[in-house]
Image (tube, rainbow, N blue to C red):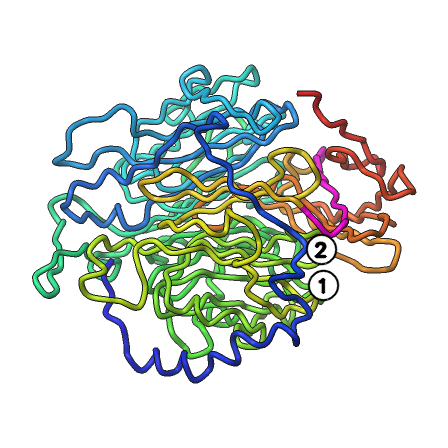
């Protein structure tokens, strides 16, 4: 995926750098006052003996350039968040290596993990691209869908700590393709989960070529291959899926898809889809209520950036960035393209407000991938994390403006959607220099704040354990559907604290860079007790939950069960 850089864009970046970066004084946050420290763990010392592989052998295949996803989810329902880290396998021309494969790590508590890949029967032998978790059969545990350069794989969770490969029996096999991000959602409001699965390009080994620059070889990019069609699978309610892509209107929508995300963007009562496309206009697929999709990317304002340019879009996040009660988009992009903040100005209508948010202009030099809008310091606003790194192994021969391995970025929110770079003072996990891809965020140690895991290409993952040092508290909520899908995907949750501050989040399955996290919702509380929580379920009906604890103290995860109006106190596991 080699792209030649436009020099005039570099000049534009310098000219507007003061607009993007702003001053710490104006933001109200400086690196020295950021209220969280994210400490790096040595993965193998905590049972995570994993080194990612892109399977490369010097032939510069395009698959190597876009690999790298992960999932954080509680696969055994013991209250501790587990890790699924994807990997490639040796590509053609390489000797076989059984050690290079995706792995499942069970959280034992106390920041100790165990590789249970074989015991759990989740032996994926493919070149993994994207991963998403969701309860497709409504039995109370999370199943796992994987895309590959190759066929899909679907693992059904048996509920006893093991999985079985159900790809064929569920009719989710697509044959050989170049898969990308996927998501679970309820396309037709029938109470079960369907799957949208993006594809990258139409690539086969007989089409493999390389590009030579100054005598050095580089992989080709998405514009050098035909775009591939995407897939929509409807859950038939009887243990299988049906490919309804053509019926849904997707046959002519072809682009190099990457990250995907689903929610009710236009607030008309059904689940829509955002697809981040590489070197093509983004899709915003609006649902007619039955699952037929119409692309409204251009009309909604998210197809291009504010210059009218189709970026090399990678990952996607959906959050209320500026605390105005509306959920916005963030997309990550290629080198010499800023990540884009699409501010929601009306349901289903967005504007590129990247410059207004003062997102750090130094990101312009790097390729950005994983992204999260996370309240790391529990101060009731969403900070921004960007995973960075290039993929061209010979990059240093032709370009000195960035490197293969670079630090990731953490930007602190001032409470009004303006950002300051606090990476240098946010802890040792932010000092890592890697070629990062997917990033996921959850509370690995059940201490009330959000930790991070970053998948690094051909290296160990970055495990960052968060310590909130400003005295602020946080709350974890898990909403459970009864009439809607059990995972309550698509539910909108609004939490209000005693001083009247309201925060909005939505339950997602599939986000970031082809990854999965966030079935639990984490709300920073500052030092204020919770007044109420309102859940708008996918069916459209709303329900108010009043906390049992009036002193603001919360332990573990609070469960909100559809139709009860009551908090079901989740106790912290004793491991």
The reply to whether the C-beta atoms of the residues labelled 1 and 2 are less than 8 Å apart is yes
Whole-percent x and y of residue 116?
46, 20
Which of 30 and 59 lies nearest the eye of the viewer?
A: 30
| Vertical order, 240 against 409 (above or below) | above
Which quarter shows the N terminus? bottom left
Whether residue 185 is visible: no
- Taking the spot 69% from the left edge, 36% from the top edge, the residue there is 447
The residue lying furthest to the bottom in this view is: 15
> Is 482 in the magenta?
yes
Is 284 displayed left or right of 483 in the figure?
Answer: left
Residue drawn at 55 percent across, 62 percent down: 329
Q: Nearer the viewer, residue 360 or 194?
A: 360
Q: Which residue is mark 2?
A: 504
In the image, residue 375 above or below residue 49: below
**Residue 321 placement: quadrant:** bottom right
Q: Nearer the viewer, residue 509 or 520?
A: 520
**Residue corresponding to mark 1:** 325
Q: Residue furthest left?
A: 215
Count the marks: 2
Q: Position of residue 242 (x, y in %)?
A: 43, 36
Helix, strand or loop at label 2? It is strand
Residue at image location 32% in from the left, 51% down from the top: 200
Q: Is residue 379 left or right of residue 397?
A: right
* Bounds of the magenta segment: 468-483
Q: Please rate how many residues cluster around mark 1, counting C-alpha atoms within 10 Å: few if below 14, some from 14 to 19, many from 20.
A: some
Residue at far right of view: 550
Helix, strand or loop status at disc 1: loop
Foreground of the two, 305 or 380: 380
Residue 105 in percent (x, y) is at 48, 26
Residue 229, magenta (yes or no) = no
In the image, what residue occupies the spot 56% across and 15% down?
160
Please identify the quadrant where the C terminus is shown. Answer: top right
């Amino acid at each position: 995926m080699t792209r030649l850089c436009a020099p005039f864009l570099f000049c534009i970046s310098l000219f507007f750098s003061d607009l993007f970066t702003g001053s710490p004084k104006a933001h109200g946050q400086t690196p020295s006052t950021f209220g969280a420290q994210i400490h790096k763990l040595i993965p193998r010392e905590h049972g995570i003996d994993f080194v990612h592989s892109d399977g490369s052998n010097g032939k510069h295949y395009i698959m190597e350039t876009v690999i790298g996803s992960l999932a954080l989810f509680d696969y055994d329902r013991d209250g501790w968040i587990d890790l699924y880290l994807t990997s490639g396998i040796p590509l053609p021309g390489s000797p076989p290596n059984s050690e290079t494969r995706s792995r499942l790590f069970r959280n034992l508590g106390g920041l100790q993990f165990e590789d249970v890949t074989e015991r759990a029967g989740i032996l994926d032998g493919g070149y993994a691209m994207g991963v998403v978790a969701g309860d497709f059969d409504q039995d109370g545990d999370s199943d796992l869908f994987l895309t590959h350069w190759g066929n899909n794989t679907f693992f059904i969770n048996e509920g006893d700590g093991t999985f079985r490969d159900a790809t064929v029996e569920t009719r989710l096999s697509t044959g050989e393709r170049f898969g990308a991000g996927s998501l679970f959602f309820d396309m037709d409001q029938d109470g079960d989960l369907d799957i949208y699965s993006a594809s990258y390009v139409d690539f086969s080994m007989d089409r493999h070529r390389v590009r030579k620059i100054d005598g050095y070889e580089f992989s080709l990019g998405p514009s050098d291959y035909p775009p591939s069609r995407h897939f929509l699978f409807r859950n038939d309610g009887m243990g299988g899926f049906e490919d309804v892509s053509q019926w849904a209107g997707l046959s002519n929508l072809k682009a190099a898809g990457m990250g995907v995300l689903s929610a009710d963007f236009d607030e008309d009562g059904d689940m829509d889809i955002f697809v981040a496309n590489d070197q093509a206009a983004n899709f915003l697929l609006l649902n007619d209520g039955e699952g037929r999709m119409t692309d409204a990317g251009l009309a909604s304002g998210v197809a291009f950036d504010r210059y009218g340019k189709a970026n090399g879009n990678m990952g996607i996040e959906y959050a209320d960035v500026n605390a105005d009660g509306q959920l916005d988009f963030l997309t990550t992009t290629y080198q010499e393209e800023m990540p884009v903040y699409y501010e929601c100005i009306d349901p289903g209508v967005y504007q590129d407000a990247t410059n207004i948010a003062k997102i750090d202009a130094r990101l312009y030099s790097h390729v950005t991938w994983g992204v999260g809008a996370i309240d790391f310091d529990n101060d009731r606003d969403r900070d921004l994390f960007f995973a960075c790194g290039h993929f061209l192994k010979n990059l240093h021969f032709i370009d000195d403006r960035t490197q293969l391995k670079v630090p990731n970025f953490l930007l602190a929110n001032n409470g009004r959607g303006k950002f300051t770079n606090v990476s240098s003072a946010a802890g040792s996990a932010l000092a890592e220099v890697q070629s990062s891809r997917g990033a996921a965020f959850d509370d690995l140690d059940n201490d009330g704040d959000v930790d991070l895991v970053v998948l690094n290409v051909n290296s160990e993952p970055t495990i960052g354990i968060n310590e909130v040092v400003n005295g602020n508290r946080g709350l974890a909520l898990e909403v459970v559907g009864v009439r809607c899908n059990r995972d309550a995907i698509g539910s909108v949750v609004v939490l209000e604290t005693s001083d009247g501050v309201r925060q909005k989040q939505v339950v997602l399955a599939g986000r970031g860079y082809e990854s999965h996290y966030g079935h639990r919702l984490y709300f920073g509380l500052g030092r204020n007790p919770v007044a109420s929580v309102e859940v708008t379920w996918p069916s459209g009906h709303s329900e108010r939950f009043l906390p049992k604890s009036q002193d603001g103290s919360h332990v573990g995860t609070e469960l909100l069960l559809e139709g009860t109006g009551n908090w079901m106190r989740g106790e912290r596991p004793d491991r």
